[in-house]
Image (cartoon, rainbow, N blue to C red):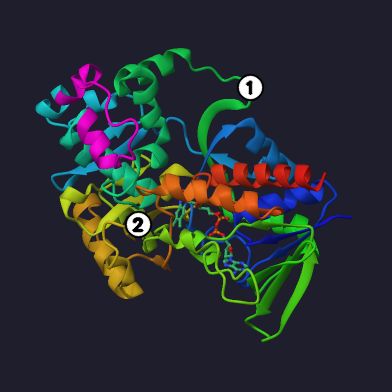
Amino acid sequence: MKKVAIVGGGITGLTAAHRLRQNHVEVTLFESSSRVGGVVRTETSNGFLAETGPNSIWLKEKRILSFFHELGLESEIIEADPNIRKRFIVREGRPVEISSTPLSLLTTPILSLSGKFRLLQEPFIKSGGLSQDESLANFVRRRIGKEALDYAIDPIVSGIFAGDPEKLSARFAFPTLWNLEKKFGSLVGGQLKRIKHSKSTGNRMKRRSVTFKKGIQSLTDAIRASLGDSIRLNSDVNRLLSESNWRVLWSNGKSGSCGSEKFDALVLALPAYKCSRLLFSDNAVQPLSFLKEIEYPPLAVQVMGFERSKIKHPLDGMGMLVPAVEGLNILGTFFSSTAFPGRSPAGHATLTTFIGGARNPNLGQNSSTQLQSLVLQDLERLLGVGGEPVFSRSYLWNNSIPQYNIGYGKILAKISEFESSNSGIFLSGNYRNGIALRQCINSGLDTADKVMSYLG
Ligand SMILES: Cc1cc2nc3c(=O)[nH]c(=O)nc-3n(C[C@H](O)[C@H](O)[C@H](O)COP(=O)(O)OP(=O)(O)OC[C@H]3O[C@@H](n4cnc5c(N)ncnc54)[C@H](O)[C@@H]3O)c2cc1C
């Protein structure tokens, strides 16, 4: 039986391990911490459910739904209420409603009349900069103007990447937008054509935002259960030696022990900055050191539960995003208990707030008490939250989400070169194939398929 090592027990590594096991490959998954799941993390207490990592999954591929079914999670899936279409973006210190329908920017007060007029000019603006690695901010200013950048794109960027649009690459961080210009010469025109021709066919289905009754961690827990004793926790892989195949060396931070074992192939499903430190011989050779160029800003997540009567806002939407130009502390708040049932006890509401990111890298470094008061300050002003929370959890991700910044294309090319000259090693994870959970699952499944064809 062929033996494969998976290094890293986040959703990507777990998915790859699960798929390889299904194909009768002997798998060992090395995870440096005392739990699997990586940034997926659900906590519950007194009827409150806190997601201190991801909150939801955009389900739009049948392949991913089948994966959930394979794991026995079919009856656990819960969908965000499709009638809750509202989102809020803060303008002049108050949340302004926008709907999630395309082109809704033309009808909401989030843009001034001149901002909307500028948007209407978009189809007549010539394409440009296609061959360059253009920043997202530049791309958006060029196509739809500064106001749309400040009040539409910047908050969305914070909500997805916790990133800085001046640094992110339009082409790699927002390929759909980039391709609209490339293919149709216009974002507005291209989007209209897409809507006209979109159908649920093949692997695609109508997209919906989902989670599980007991939280996102149900997913990684289910994979963990299916892998059984293939998982080695507290096993920090630090060196890989090329012999007739690959030898993996690890140390156990808890017991102080270390070990090594040979494998026919390796999947590295680690964060990029961790991959960059791996040694590849008895000397201090770090051929993946170029991966340290991928930035991971710190991001803090503050989950708070309140008596419902203490919040004036109707919370009748998925959440609220805060543009940088508003100068507030927070990046945005997800209305957890509006979006999904079972997130708070009756008569209460749960709010999940993000703070820090590339916009404010130092804010995330505050103590949990300071963080809570910074968040409360903004929530009081924006949502009319009065009084102290009855439930509170804060979690700081020192290295949160990989940024697909300008220059990212060159890093991707180096990753491919590395794989070509080191056969039997496969790199996978959110720094390579998209940061969303659904992309990480796809990446894990695709990597397992590549390993299978390598093993023959
Ligand atoms: C706060 C936050 C909110 C998010 N919200 C959403 C959301 O709502 N929806 C969505 O789709 N996506 C969201 N994302 C993104 C998504 O959750 C992540 O991109 C994805 O979970 C990353 O999975 P991964 O397996 O690639 O990496 P990770 O989860 O980072 O897993 C890597 C694993 O490798 C282990 N490891 C590190 N070094 C070693 C070593 N030397 N040896 C062995 N093991 C090692 C780590 O301990 C970790 O378990 C969010 C991310 C964050 C941080």
Q: Is ligand 1 less than 8 Å from the beta carbon at label 2?
A: yes
Number of dots carrying numbers: 2
* Image-based side of 372 in relation to 235, left or right: left
- Residue 128, horizontal then vertical, whole percent: 27, 27
Expressed as whole percent of the image width and height from the top left, the position of residue 59 reads 55, 36
Residue tagged 1: 202
- Amino acid beneath label 1: Gly
Q: State whether residue 248 is above or below residue 104.
A: below
User: Magenta includes 414?
Assistant: no
Q: Is residue 129 above or below residue 278?
A: above
Q: What amino acid is found at the position of numbered circle 2 in the picture?
A: Phe
- In the image, is residue 266 above or below residue 157? below
Say which residue appears at 49% left-offset and 38% top-offset.
Answer: 80
Judge by depth and name the residue closer to the eye, 27 or 58: 27
Residue at far right of view: 1
Local secondary structure at mark 2: strand
Q: Is residue 72 visible?
A: no
Q: Does dot 1 land on a helix, a strand or a loop?
A: loop
Marks 2, 1: nearer the viewer: 1
Residue 159 or residue 129, whichever sits in front: 129
Residue 152 image-quadrant placement:
top left
Give the residue displayed 48% in from the left and 44% down from the top: 340
Q: Is residue 123 magenta?
A: yes
| Residue lying at 44% horizontally and 43% vertically, measured from the top left | 339
Span highlighted in magenta in the image: 118-143
